[in-house]
Each structure stands twice: as structure tokens, then as C-alpha cells.
């Protein structure tokens, strides 16, 4: 349990946002959600987040671009990228952007908790 | 067919033979005319010479006959002799003329005493020379040959008892003998007629022979050649010209036949070439059509792939929700409610299977990363059958399974092989129009180290025609109605099997059914699972 850690979930799919909240909430994290990048960036300005979970594929702005922006602007914030089906290409690009953690959808609660813990610990 | 030769009737004088015959006949006619004329003239000359000689000798005979009479001055006997001699058919008249031209004696006594006109031959004979015979025409139109013989003075004359002539006179008179030429003239006319008739017959028969010769050696071969050329012009190259002679005509015919054969060969070559070109064009056209279909199919597949990928991505999020909430629900479920936990586990298991199916779909779109694991093929087949048997498609399909017991495990990608089996079952049902039976069997075949697991899927469908058997593993080959089959199911399956070192074969009998045999190699002894 690492209480007090702030996590922002940016995903256009409500079910994903709820799933994350319901999985990570009981773990003691403080979860905020955003439906799209604009909302996510707004929330990032309002509050300092330890971790951002964002989908690779979203309307308006590419998740990878968003992640690159976050990496540049909030270097202390960790990022976990959700991908549908990871290929070597997307993994490589993610690593090039400074994102060390990514997750394949769909995921189980266990897997999500495990990855989140690893990211926050690293 | 184009009519190259306008059939035109030619007049005989227009033909080659006609022209030649006409020219030769004219030449022959003029030649024989000339020869006849020369022959006639020659013969006439001989005749005239003979006549002259004959006349001369007769004149001489006359002179000798009257010689004695004159010497002895027996004038009456001499007159008689003359008259007798004149009765000869040849002799018309005999006269003895004085040097002054007066008829002293004559065979016709009435002309006695007349003076003849002095003429050049007469003058010559008076001078003692013998002139050549002279041709005379009488008042009656009779032709005569007149011989003038000078009667020269000789000792017997001037010493004769009569003393009529003195020694000084050189010529005592002239003996004039007129010969009839009527007989000769008749002969001449006969000869002329004969020559003319002979010439005409000769020209006619020669012309006839020429016509025959020309017909045989020119007209007939030329007609044959002309006919052959007409045949050639209308496209008949198979009938040769039949001229066997060894002359120029034969040579011409032979050359012509060779030419026709050459043309025939060239034409055949050209036809062959055209045919092979047509075949090539047809083949290429078919290839283009096929390629076009392949492009369309590839495009269809690509858009299908894009759609599948989109759907797969869309499904990921709800699956995340299902998995998450099932897990949460399961965590909340008290441990004693075993049935609930089992049910929730089933949801989780099936959700994970969905995840794999989606990943598999995406994997086909891209270069799939296979996840190989030790798999029991019997179990996999069982699961696949479980999956399909509730589909409407398989409601009227009986599925028989005959599996070998204790089947060795295979290191394969179960998801991919589930697709292979699914494809085989779906194809079987399609082939049987969703009505019939499918039998699935597994067996271990071969000897170490080449051992295989063989999976046989047999349907009771209509079978595959032999000419289609080779093509069924080719991409985009399908016999299903347009829009129903992509023609990719079997090729993709084949690719998966090949990738695992296996093989797939097919046996089919039209009207009885089709069997697919999938063979997958078993790992050799001691080989590690990798």
C-alpha cells in the first residue's frame, strides 16, 4: 500500500476508467480520471500526479504524443501506456519517448496492480 | 476468297500456241512457196534445156535428112522428106531459107517463096553462126521454139553437078525448124499444179502436226500451269501441278510446286505462330484477370483486416471491464460459495480466450508472434468441436470423433491450430451444405525418428474435382459463391502447418467426400521443448 500517490487515468472508454478506479482505489491510491487529452492536460496543470495511465489510441491526440508531452513537461510523473496489441514497433517508439511501462489491453486487476507498483517503485 | 483471275475466254489467235502456229504457218507457207518456186524454176530450166537439146538434135536430124537431097538436087524427094518430118508431133514447120530470107523449101508448100522478116538470129545464122533457139508465138497463140541452123558451104556443094553454089559462098542458106512446145507447156503446167498441191498439202499437214505438237508440249502444260496458279490463288496449296516432262515446262511446274510447298509451309508456320500467340495472349489475359481478382481480394482482405483490427481494438476495452469486474466480484465472493466462484472463473477463462482470439486476429493482420506450448491435440480438437457444435451451421451435421489414446503432446500454438481445425470443420460443413457427417480422427504414424501425429477430417460432401485439387492450397482460390469465401482459409492453415514443420494433404472422390490429413512432427527423442 502506497497511500497518497496520485494517479490520473486518461482513456476515452468509461469502462476502462471505472475498471482502473475500482482496481487501484482499494489499493490506497488517489485516482482521477479524464475522458480525453484536453481534460487530462487540464488536470495535470491543477495537480501533481505521480503516475498517468493513458491509452495509446485516443481521439484528437495520439497517446504517444501526449506521453511525450508529459515526459517533457512533468519529468517526475511516470507514465503507463495502454496498448491494444503491442508490436515491436510501438514498444520501441515508447521506449524512445522515455516511457518504460506499457500494458496490453485487456488486463486483469492483478496485472494492473503489479505494473503500477513497479512503475511507482522505479 | 478473292478472285485473282477473271475467267476470260480467249480467241484462238490470242493464245500463245495460236500465235506461234499462225506465225509458223505463215513462215512455212512463204518458205514452201519460195522453195516450190525455185524447184519449179529449176525443173522448168531443165525441161527447157532438154527441149532445146532435143530440138537441136531433131533440127540436126532434119538437116542431115535433107542433106543428100540438096546435094543431089532431088528437090521433090527433099520436099517429101520435109513434109514427112513435119508430120512429127513435135515439129510444126520446117523451112529452108535462102541467105536473102526467101523460103526455098518448106514443109508447108504454101509458104514457099515467101520472104521472111530479117531478124537478129536470122542475121547471125546467115553470117554462119548458130543463134540460140528463139521462142515464137504464132498468130494462133501457139508457142514455138525456133531453131536456125546455117547451111554452110562445103566442097560437096560447090562441086556438085548442079553448080548452083560457087565456092566463095560461105553460107548457102538457113534451115529453120519450128518446134511445138505444147507438150512441154502441158508438163510445165502439170508440174506447177503439182508443186502447188504438194506445197499446200505439206503446209497443211505441217501446220496440223505443229498444232498437235504445240497442244501436247505447250498448250496443255500452260493450261495446267494456269489452272495450278488459279488453285494457288484461291488458297489450294495441296494439289500440285502434274507435268512430268523434263523440259522447261516440267522445270517450271516443279519450281511452281516447290514454291507452293514453301508458301504452304510459311502459311502453316504463320498459323502456328498466330495460334501460339493467341494462346499466349489468352494465358496472359487469364493471368491479368486472375491478378486483378487477387488485387481485389487482397484489397478486400486488407479492408477486412483493418476492420478486424478496429473491432479487436474496440473489444479490448469492454474485455478489460469484464475481466476487472469478474475478478472484483470473485474476490468479494465468500470462499464457501464454490459454484459462484467456478462460474466466475469460467467467465474469466472465456474472457481470456476472447483476448487470445482478438490477438490472433490482429496477429494475422500483422506478422503474428506465435505462442507455442505443449498441447494435447485431442483436447484442442474437443474444444474446437465444443465451440462449433452449438452453431446453427452445425445443427444438422453429425460429428464423429475417434482419437488415439495417450496422444503425445505437441509443441504448437494452440490458438493458431484451433483456427486451422475451425477452418477445416467450417469448410466441411460448407461443402456438405450444412447437412451430413464429419469424422475426426487422430493417430500416430511413422517410425522413429520420423513420427507424426495425423489428424484426419473427412466429410460426406460432394468431393473436389481432380483439376481443382491442385489449386485448393493456392491463395484466393475458392469455389464458394462470390463474397462468401476469401480463398484464404486453407492457404493460411497450410501456412500455419508448414510453419510448425508439418504438412497437409487432401484426398477426394467426387460424389463420396473429401479427407484432409494434417501431419505434425513429434519431437525427436531427447530434443528439448523450445
Image (cartoon, grey):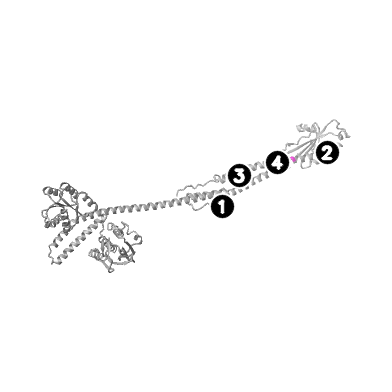
Task: Please report whichever mark, 2 or 1, sits nearer to the chain's N-terminal start.
Answer: 2
- Residue, x 61% and y 44% (percent of image)? B25
Label 3 neighbourhood size at 10 Å, few (<14), some (14-19), many (20+)? some
Please give the residue where the numbered disc 2 appears in the rendered image: B66
Task: Please report whichever mark, 3 or 4, sits nearer to the chain's N-terminal start.
Answer: 3
Please give the residue where the numbered disc 4 appears in the rendered image: B42
Label 4 neighbourhood size at 10 Å, few (<14), some (14-19), many (20+)? few
Task: Please report whichever mark, 3 or 1, sits nearer to the chain's N-terminal start.
Answer: 3
Nearer the camera: disc 2 or disc 1: 1
Left/right of residue B49 with respect to residue B155 in the rendered view: left
Please give the residue where the numbered disc 1 appears in the rendered image: B244
Please state the horizontal and vertical placement of residue B419, each as a whole percent of the image.
Answer: 26, 60
Q: CA distance from mark 2 to mark 3?
A: 59 Å
The numbered mark 2 sits on a residue in which chain?
B
Q: Are marks 2 and 1 on the same chain?
A: yes
B247 w.r.t. B436: above or below: above
Please state the horizontal and vertical placement of residue B63, each as a whole percent of the image.
Answer: 81, 38
Nearer the camera: disc 3 or disc 1: 1
User: What range of the chain is rendered magenta?
Assistant: B45-49
Magenta-drawn stretch, dominant element (helix, strand or loop): helix
Q: CA distance from mark 4 to mark 2?
A: 36 Å
Q: CA distance from mark 4 to mark 1?
A: 48 Å
- The label number, if any, that marks residue B25 in the structure image: 3
Image quarter of the N terminus of chain A: bottom left
Q: Are marks 3 and 4 in contact (CB under 8 Å)?
A: no
Amino acid at each position: 500500500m502506497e497511500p497518497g500517490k496520485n494517479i490520473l487515468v486518461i482513456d476515452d472508454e468509461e469502462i476502462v476508467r471505472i475498471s482502473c478506479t475500482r482496481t487501484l482505489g482499494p489499493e490506497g491510491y488517489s485516482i482521477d480520471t479524464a475522458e480525453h487529452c484536453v481534460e487530462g492536460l487540464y488536470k495535470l496543470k491543477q495537480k501533481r500526479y505521480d503516475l498517468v495511465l493513458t491509452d495509446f489510441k485516443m481521439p484528437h491526440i495520439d497517446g504517444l504524443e501526449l506521453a511525450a508531452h508529459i515526459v517533457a513537461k512533468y519529468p517526475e510523473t511516470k507514465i503507463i501506456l495502454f496498448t491494444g496489441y503491442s508490436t515491436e514497433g510501438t514498444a520501441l517508439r515508447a521506449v524512445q519517448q522515455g516511457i518504460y511501462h506499457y500494458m496490453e489491453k485487456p488486463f486483469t486487476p492483478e496485472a494492473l496492480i503489479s505494473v503500477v507498483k513497479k512503475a511507482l517503485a522505479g | 476468297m478473292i478472285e485473282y483471275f477473271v475467267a476470260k475466254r480467249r480467241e484462238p489467235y490470242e493464245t500463245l500456241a495460236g500465235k506461234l502456229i499462225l506465225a509458223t504457218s505463215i513462215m512455212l507457207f512463204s518458205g514452201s512457196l519460195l522453195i516450190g518456186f525455185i524447184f519449179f524454176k529449176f525443173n522448168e530450166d531443165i525441161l527447157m534445156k532438154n527441149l532445146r537439146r532435143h530440138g537441136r538434135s531433131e533440127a540436126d536430124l532434119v538437116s542431115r535428112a535433107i542433106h543428100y537431097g540438096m546435094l543431089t538436087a532431088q528437090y521433090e524427094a527433099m520436099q517429101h522428106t520435109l513434109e514427112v518430118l513435119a508430120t512429127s508431133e513435135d515439129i510444126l514447120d520446117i523451112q529452108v531459107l535462102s541467105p536473102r530470107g526467101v523460103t526455098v523449101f518448106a514443109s508447108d508448100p504454101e509458104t514457099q517463096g515467101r520472104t521472111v522478116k530479117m531478124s537478129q538470129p536470122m542475121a547471125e545464122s546467115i553470117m554462119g553462126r548458130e543463134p540460140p533457139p528463139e521462142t515464137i508465138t504464132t498468130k494462133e497463140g501457139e508457142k514455138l521454139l525456133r531453131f536456125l541452123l546455117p547451111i554452110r558451104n562445103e566442097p560437096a556443094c560447090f562441086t556438085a553437078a548442079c553448080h548452083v553454089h560457087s565456092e566463095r559462098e560461105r553460107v548457102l542458106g538457113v534451115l529453120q525448124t519450128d518446134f511445138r512446145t505444147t507438150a512441154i507447156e502441158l508438163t510445165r503446167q502439170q508440174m506447177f499444179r503439182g508443186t502447188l498441191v504438194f506445197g499446200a498439202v505439206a503446209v497443211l499437214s505441217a501446220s496440223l502436226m505443229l498444232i498437235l505438237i504445240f497442244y501436247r508440249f505447250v498448250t496443255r502444260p500452260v493450261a495446267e500451269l494456269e489452272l495450278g496458279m488459279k488453285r494457288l490463288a484461291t488458297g489450294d496449296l495441296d494439289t500440285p501441278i502434274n507435268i512430268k516432262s523434263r523440259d522447261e515446262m516440267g522445270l517450271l511446274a516443279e519450281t511452281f510446286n516447290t514454291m507452293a510447298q514453301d508458301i504452304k509451309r510459311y502459311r502453316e508456320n504463320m498459323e502456328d505462330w498466330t495460334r501460339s500467340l493467341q494462346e499466349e495472349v489468352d494465358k496472359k489475359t487469364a493471368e491479368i484477370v486472375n491478378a486483378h481478382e487477387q488485387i481485389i481480394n487482397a484489397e478486400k482482405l486488407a479492408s477486412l483486416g483493418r476492420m478486424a483490427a478496429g473491432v479487436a481494438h474496440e473489444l479490448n476495452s469492454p474485455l478489460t471491464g469484464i475481466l476487472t469486474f469478474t475478478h472484483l466480484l470473485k474476490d468479494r465472493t465468500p470462499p464457501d460459495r464454490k459454484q459462484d466462484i467456478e462460474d466466475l472463473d469460467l467467465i474469466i477463462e472465456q474472457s481470456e480466450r476472447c483476448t487470445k482470439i482478438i490477438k490472433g486476429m490482429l496477429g494475422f493482420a500483422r506478422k503474428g508472434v506465435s505462442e507455442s506450448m505443449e498441447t494435447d491435440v485431442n483436447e484442442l480438437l474437443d474444444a474446437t468441436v465444443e465451440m462449433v457444435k452449438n452453431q446453427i451451421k452445425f445443427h444438422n451435421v453429425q460429428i464423429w470423433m475417434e482419437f488415439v489414446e495417450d496422444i503425445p503432446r505437441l509443441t504448437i500454438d494452440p490458438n493458431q491450430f484451433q483456427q486451422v481445425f475451425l477452418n477445416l470443420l467450417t469448410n466441411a460443413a460448407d461443402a456438405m451444405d450444412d447437412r451430413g457427417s464429419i469424422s475426426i480422427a487422430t493417430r500416430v504414424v511413422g517410425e522413429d525418428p520420423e513420427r507424426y501425429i495425423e489428424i484426419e477430417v473427412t466429410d460426406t460432401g460432394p468431393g473436389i474435382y481432380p483439376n481443382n485439387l491442385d489449386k485448393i492450397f493456392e491463395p484466393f482460390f475458392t469455389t464458394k459463391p462470390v463474397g462468401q469465401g476469401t480463398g484464404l482459409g486453407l492457404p493460411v492453415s497450410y501456412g500455419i502447418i508448414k510453419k510448425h514443420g508439418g504438412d497437409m494433404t487432401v484426398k477426394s472422390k467426387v460424389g463420396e467426400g473429401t479427407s484432409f490429413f494434417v501431419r505434425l512432427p513429434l519431437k525427436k527423442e531427447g530434443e528439448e521443448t523450445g
